[in-house]
Each structure stands twice: as structure tokens, then as C-alpha cells.
Amino acid sequence: MSTPIEVLHQSYTQPRSAHPSFKPGDTVCVHLKIQERNKERIQKFEGTVIKDKGQTIADKTFTVRKISNGVPVWRIFPIELPAIQKIEVIRRGLVRRANLSYLRGKIGQAAKIKHKKFIGKKSMKKNKPDTQKAQTNQPEAQAPKQAKA
């Protein structure tokens, strides 16, 4: 006979929904279902992923940090929380660390993360202006006329 903990763990081993892949440094928008008395609504929590923790689906959590009225706020979400309707990845971040806890003490420009600007092969090509066309489109300079004295 299995214990209630094992039953709960087995129910979490199959992924309930397919969330997009994200990592620390990415800006995500988490859509949560909030129930207030007899009404339900969807609330968005948009911010930067600070860390990703856990190995199995049952243990996996991620921390999202946002600024609310000038005050930094962070929240820990289990990846398979039933209240999460969907997770949207807004921007991909360029970071070298797996844990961005150093952002907790920073506000404003100091907490800014660089983001990937180009995605795909087309954006990798550099558009170089044609130098010959640029020279032919310029009007010819005329010598200034000298006045007779």
C-alpha cells in the first residue's frame, strides 16, 4: 500500500501542462488564477526570473522579481502550481550566472539585464551600405566663383 506522499509525488511526475522553457535572466509574465469569495480572475505577475531550483517536476520552483511602486517584490512559484494558467516569455536575458540573487539589493538602472536583440538567422547578417552607390548619389562640388576686383 502506498503512502499519501507517494501518491502525491506520482501525480506530479507527469507534467500537467507544457510551459515554455526559460532560465534565470529572462523576463516572464506568469498568469495566475485568483479566487476572491465567489469570483475568479486572472492576475499577471511580470518580472525577471532570479533563480530556478529543483530537479524533478515535483520539486521544481522558480523565483520572479518585479518592481511594484518602487519597491522590489519577489515571489516563488512551483512550476506545476494549479493556479498558474500560463507562462509567457517576454524577453531572453544575457546573464552568466544561474542564481541572480545579487539583484535583490539593486533598484532601477543598477538592476537592468541585457537582453538578446536578435533571434534567428536573418538577423545575423550585417547590412553593409554599398559605398559606390553612396558616392554616386552625392552632388558634385563646384569650385566657388571668384569675384573680380
Image (tube, rainbow, N blue to C red):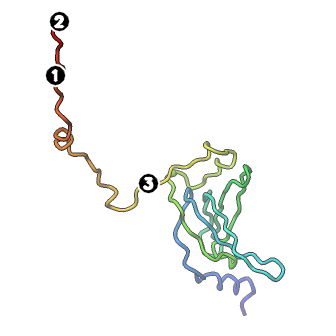
Q: Nearer the viewer, residue 7 or 80?
A: 80
Q: Quadrant of residue 35?
A: bottom right
Counting from the top left corner in percent of width and height, residue 131 is at 20, 41
Disc 3 to disc 2, C-alpha distance: 62 Å
The residue sitting at the right extreme is 37
Q: Kindly identify the residue that appears in the image at 54 percent across and 78 percent down.
A: 18
Q: Kindly state the secondary structure of the residue where label 2 is placed.
A: loop
Amino acid bearing label 2: Ala
- Mark 3 secondary-structure assignment: loop
What residue would you read off at disc 2?
149
Q: Residues within 10 Å of mark 1 (few under 14, many from 20)?
A: few
Residue situated in front as seen by the camera: 139 or 55: 139
Q: Is residue 105 left or right of residue 121?
A: right
Q: Which residue is mark 1?
A: 143
Q: Percent position (x, y) of residue 121?
A: 32, 61
Q: Which residue is mark 3?
A: 117
